Protein backbone atom coordinates (compact mmCIF):
# COMPACT_ATOMS: atom_id res chain seq x y z
CA UNK A 1 0.00 0.00 0.00
CA UNK A 2 1.33 3.42 -0.91
CA UNK A 3 2.26 5.87 1.86
CA UNK A 4 1.01 8.75 -0.26
CA UNK A 5 -1.91 10.57 1.36
CA UNK A 6 -4.72 11.84 -0.90
CA UNK A 7 -5.20 15.59 -0.63
CA UNK A 8 -8.49 17.35 -1.27
CA UNK A 9 -8.18 19.35 -4.43
CA UNK A 10 -11.12 21.70 -3.97
CA UNK A 11 -9.71 23.57 -0.98
CA UNK A 12 -7.56 26.52 -2.07
CA UNK A 13 -4.12 27.00 -0.62
CA UNK A 14 -2.89 30.13 1.11
CA UNK A 15 -2.11 31.87 -2.18
CA UNK A 16 -5.83 32.07 -2.92
CA UNK A 17 -6.49 34.22 0.12
CA UNK A 18 -6.53 38.02 -0.01
CA UNK A 19 -3.22 39.68 0.67
CA UNK A 20 -2.91 41.65 3.89
CA UNK A 21 -0.54 44.35 5.01
CA UNK A 22 2.03 42.71 7.27
CA UNK A 23 3.53 45.96 8.54
CA UNK A 24 2.48 46.75 12.10
CA UNK A 25 3.24 49.47 14.59
CA UNK A 26 5.62 48.41 17.34
CA UNK A 27 5.83 50.22 20.70
CA UNK A 28 8.91 52.06 19.41
CA UNK A 29 6.80 53.35 16.50
CA UNK A 30 9.18 51.61 14.12
CA UNK A 31 7.68 49.63 11.27
CA UNK A 32 8.77 46.02 10.99
CA UNK A 33 7.47 43.27 8.77
CA UNK A 34 5.81 40.47 10.70
CA UNK A 35 7.42 37.97 8.34
CA UNK A 36 10.85 38.90 9.73
CA UNK A 37 9.97 38.64 13.42
CA UNK A 38 11.29 36.07 15.86
CA UNK A 39 9.13 34.68 18.65
CA UNK A 40 9.85 37.46 21.14
CA UNK A 41 9.22 40.21 18.60
CA UNK A 42 6.03 38.56 17.42
CA UNK A 43 4.66 38.21 20.93
CA UNK A 44 5.42 41.87 21.65
CA UNK A 45 3.75 42.92 18.42
CA UNK A 46 0.61 40.97 19.31
CA UNK A 47 0.58 42.36 22.84
CA UNK A 48 0.70 45.95 21.58
CA UNK A 49 -1.61 45.48 18.59
CA UNK A 50 -4.49 47.94 18.17
CA UNK A 51 -5.29 47.10 14.54
CA UNK A 52 -8.96 46.26 15.12
CA UNK A 53 -11.72 47.14 17.63
CA UNK A 54 -11.14 43.93 19.61
CA UNK A 55 -8.15 45.66 21.21
CA UNK A 56 -10.56 48.04 22.94
CA UNK A 57 -12.54 45.34 24.72
CA UNK A 58 -9.90 42.71 25.55
CA UNK A 59 -8.34 42.25 28.96
CA UNK A 60 -5.18 40.98 27.30
CA UNK A 61 -4.07 39.28 24.12
CA UNK A 62 -3.90 35.50 23.88
CA UNK A 63 -0.82 34.71 21.86
CA UNK A 64 -0.59 30.93 21.73
CA UNK A 65 1.05 28.15 23.69
CA UNK A 66 3.02 24.96 23.27
CA UNK A 67 6.11 23.48 21.69
CA UNK A 68 7.59 26.03 19.30
CA UNK A 69 8.95 23.25 17.10
CA UNK A 70 5.83 21.08 17.24
CA UNK A 71 4.75 18.60 14.59
CA UNK A 72 1.11 19.25 15.48
CA UNK A 73 -0.55 22.67 15.21
CA UNK A 74 -4.12 23.05 16.50
CA UNK A 75 -5.91 26.26 15.53
CA UNK A 76 -9.16 27.44 17.10
CA UNK A 77 -11.22 30.55 16.45
CA UNK A 78 -10.57 32.96 19.32
CA UNK A 79 -10.24 33.36 23.09
CA UNK A 80 -13.19 33.06 25.44
CA UNK A 81 -13.69 34.79 28.77
CA UNK A 82 -11.40 32.43 30.68
CA UNK A 83 -8.67 32.71 28.06
CA UNK A 84 -9.01 36.51 28.03
CA UNK A 85 -8.51 36.54 31.79
CA UNK A 86 -5.50 34.21 31.85
CA UNK A 87 -3.84 35.02 28.52
CA UNK A 88 -3.60 31.41 27.33
CA UNK A 89 -5.71 29.59 24.73
CA UNK A 90 -8.06 26.75 25.64
CA UNK A 91 -7.95 26.94 29.44
CA UNK A 92 -11.69 26.73 30.17
CA UNK A 93 -13.99 23.73 29.86
CA UNK A 94 -13.29 23.55 26.13
CA UNK A 95 -9.60 23.49 26.96
CA UNK A 96 -10.06 20.55 29.31
CA UNK A 97 -11.87 18.68 26.57
CA UNK A 98 -9.10 19.54 24.10
CA UNK A 99 -6.53 18.15 26.53
CA UNK A 100 -8.58 14.94 26.73
CA UNK A 101 -8.76 14.80 22.93
CA UNK A 102 -4.99 15.18 22.72
CA UNK A 103 -4.45 12.50 25.34
CA UNK A 104 -6.71 10.12 23.42
CA UNK A 105 -4.26 10.10 20.51
CA UNK A 106 -1.13 10.06 22.65
CA UNK A 107 -0.43 13.79 22.74
CA UNK A 108 0.05 16.35 25.49
CA UNK A 109 -0.16 20.11 25.48
CA UNK A 110 3.37 21.58 25.21
CA UNK A 111 4.82 18.29 23.94
CA UNK A 112 5.07 18.32 20.14
CA UNK A 113 1.85 20.37 20.11
CA UNK A 114 1.30 24.08 19.54
CA UNK A 115 -2.09 25.76 20.02
CA UNK A 116 -3.16 29.06 18.47
CA UNK A 117 -6.29 30.90 17.35
CA UNK A 118 -7.50 32.78 14.29
CA UNK A 119 -7.71 35.96 16.41
CA UNK A 120 -5.64 36.88 19.46
CA UNK A 121 -8.29 38.93 21.29
CA UNK A 122 -11.65 37.84 22.67
CA UNK A 123 -14.64 38.85 20.54
CA UNK A 124 -17.30 40.42 22.80
CA UNK A 125 -19.87 37.94 24.03
CA UNK A 126 -17.83 35.08 22.54
CA UNK A 127 -19.26 35.83 19.10
CA UNK A 128 -17.46 34.60 16.00
CA UNK A 129 -14.59 36.80 14.80
CA UNK A 130 -15.62 39.16 12.03
CA UNK A 131 -13.78 38.97 8.68
CA UNK A 132 -11.90 42.24 9.27
CA UNK A 133 -10.77 41.08 12.70
CA UNK A 134 -9.49 37.79 11.30
CA UNK A 135 -7.77 39.63 8.47
CA UNK A 136 -5.92 41.94 10.85
CA UNK A 137 -4.73 38.99 12.93
CA UNK A 138 -3.82 36.85 9.93
CA UNK A 139 -0.17 38.02 9.59
CA UNK A 140 0.48 37.02 13.20
CA UNK A 141 -0.96 33.55 12.67
CA UNK A 142 0.95 33.08 9.42
CA UNK A 143 4.17 33.99 11.19
CA UNK A 144 3.42 31.53 13.99
CA UNK A 145 2.89 28.81 11.40
CA UNK A 146 6.14 29.73 9.67
CA UNK A 147 8.07 29.65 12.94
CA UNK A 148 6.58 26.37 14.17
CA UNK A 149 6.81 24.63 10.77
CA UNK A 150 4.29 21.94 11.74
CA UNK A 151 3.90 18.68 9.87
CA UNK A 152 0.11 18.79 10.29
CA UNK A 153 -2.49 21.46 11.07
CA UNK A 154 -5.80 20.60 12.74
CA UNK A 155 -8.48 23.26 12.30
CA UNK A 156 -10.83 23.24 15.28
CA UNK A 157 -14.29 24.29 14.13
CA UNK A 158 -15.92 26.03 11.20
CA UNK A 159 -14.45 29.49 11.84
CA UNK A 160 -10.89 28.17 11.81
CA UNK A 161 -11.56 26.02 8.75
CA UNK A 162 -13.20 28.75 6.68
CA UNK A 163 -10.43 31.23 7.45
CA UNK A 164 -7.57 28.83 6.82
CA UNK A 165 -9.07 27.32 3.67
CA UNK A 166 -10.85 30.44 2.37
CA UNK A 167 -14.06 28.50 1.94
CA UNK A 168 -17.69 28.83 2.89
CA UNK A 169 -18.24 25.08 2.74
CA UNK A 170 -19.90 23.36 5.66
CA UNK A 171 -17.77 21.74 8.32
CA UNK A 172 -19.42 18.41 7.58
CA UNK A 173 -18.24 18.56 3.97
CA UNK A 174 -14.68 19.46 5.02
CA UNK A 175 -14.24 16.63 7.51
CA UNK A 176 -12.70 13.30 6.61
CA UNK A 177 -10.31 14.53 3.95
CA UNK A 178 -6.86 16.02 3.80
CA UNK A 179 -6.64 19.66 2.75
CA UNK A 180 -3.60 21.73 1.88
CA UNK A 181 -2.51 24.96 3.54
CA UNK A 182 0.56 26.35 1.79
CA UNK A 183 2.04 22.88 1.47
CA UNK A 184 1.07 21.76 4.98
CA UNK A 185 -1.56 19.01 5.32
CA UNK A 186 -4.64 20.22 7.17
CA UNK A 187 -7.50 18.29 8.78
CA UNK A 188 -10.81 19.77 9.93
CA UNK A 189 -12.70 18.70 13.05
CA UNK A 190 -15.15 20.13 15.55
CA UNK A 191 -14.32 22.85 18.05
CA UNK A 192 -14.24 21.49 21.62
CA UNK A 193 -16.76 24.13 22.74
CA UNK A 194 -19.20 22.82 20.14
CA UNK A 195 -18.67 19.27 21.36
CA UNK A 196 -19.55 20.34 24.91
CA UNK A 197 -22.93 21.46 23.57
CA UNK A 198 -23.40 18.61 21.09
CA UNK A 199 -22.37 15.36 22.71
CA UNK A 200 -23.71 13.31 19.81
CA UNK A 201 -20.88 14.53 17.58
CA UNK A 202 -18.10 13.32 19.88
CA UNK A 203 -17.96 10.03 17.97
CA UNK A 204 -17.39 11.94 14.73
CA UNK A 205 -14.68 14.00 16.41
CA UNK A 206 -13.00 10.75 17.45
CA UNK A 207 -13.04 9.65 13.81
CA UNK A 208 -11.30 12.90 12.89
CA UNK A 209 -8.67 12.40 15.57
CA UNK A 210 -7.98 8.87 14.39
CA UNK A 211 -7.65 10.20 10.84
CA UNK A 212 -5.23 12.86 12.06
CA UNK A 213 -3.17 10.29 13.95
CA UNK A 214 -2.93 7.96 10.95
CA UNK A 215 -2.06 10.91 8.72
CA UNK A 216 0.77 11.93 11.04
CA UNK A 217 2.06 8.37 11.09
CA UNK A 218 2.14 8.37 7.29
CA UNK A 219 3.88 11.74 7.21
CA UNK A 220 6.54 10.55 9.66
CA UNK A 221 7.04 7.31 7.72
CA UNK A 222 7.42 9.25 4.48
CA UNK A 223 9.93 11.62 6.09
CA UNK A 224 11.91 8.66 7.41
CA UNK A 225 12.03 7.05 3.96
CA UNK A 226 13.20 10.32 2.42
CA UNK A 227 15.95 10.86 5.00
CA UNK A 228 19.56 10.64 3.73
CA UNK A 229 20.94 7.13 4.07
CA UNK A 230 17.52 5.47 4.39
CA UNK A 231 16.96 2.24 2.52
CA UNK A 232 14.32 2.17 -0.23
CA UNK A 233 11.02 0.56 0.82
Image (cartoon, rainbow, N blue to C red):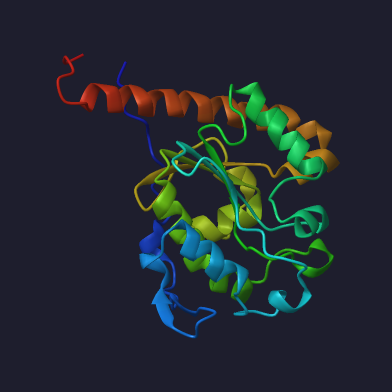
Q: Position of residue 5 (x, y in %)?
A: 37, 31
Query: Which quadrant of the structure image shows residue 217?
Result: top left
- Where residue 151 appears, as percent x and y from the top left, is 41, 38
Q: Is residue 166 visible?
A: no
Residue 204 point in image, percent of width and height: 68, 31
> Compared with residue 16, is residue 87 higher up or lower down, i.e. above or below?
above
Q: In this rendering, is residue 68 above or below 40?
A: above
Q: Quadrant of residue 209?
A: top right
Residue located 63% across and 79% down the image? 50
Residue at image coords 28%, 23%: 224
Q: Nearer the viewer, residue 164 or 50?
A: 50
Residue visible at 64% across and 57% down? 159
Please identify the residue farthest to the front as the structure is shown.
28
* In-image side of 192 versus 1 (left or right): right
Of the 4 image quadrants, the one containing the N terminus is: top left
Looking at the picture, tell me which residue is in the foreground, 84 or 171: 84
Q: Is residue 99 visible from the viewing direction of this image?
A: yes
Give the residue drawn at x 49%, y 56%.
165
* Quarter of the figure that contains the C terminus: top left
- Nearer the observer, 220 or 64: 64
Q: Give the farthest residue toward the bottom.
A: 29
Question: Is residue 170 found left or right of 226 in the rendered image?
Answer: right
Q: Is residue 49 above or below residue 197?
A: below
Q: Is residue 31 left or right of residue 233?
A: right
Q: How many numbered marks are there?
A: 0
Amino acid sequence: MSDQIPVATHAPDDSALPETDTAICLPTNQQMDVVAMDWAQLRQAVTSCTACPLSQTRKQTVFGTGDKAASWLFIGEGPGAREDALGEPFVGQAGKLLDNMLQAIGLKRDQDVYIANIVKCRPPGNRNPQPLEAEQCRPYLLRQIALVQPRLIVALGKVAAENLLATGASLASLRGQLHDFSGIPLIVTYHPAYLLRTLTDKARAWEDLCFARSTMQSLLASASNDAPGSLPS
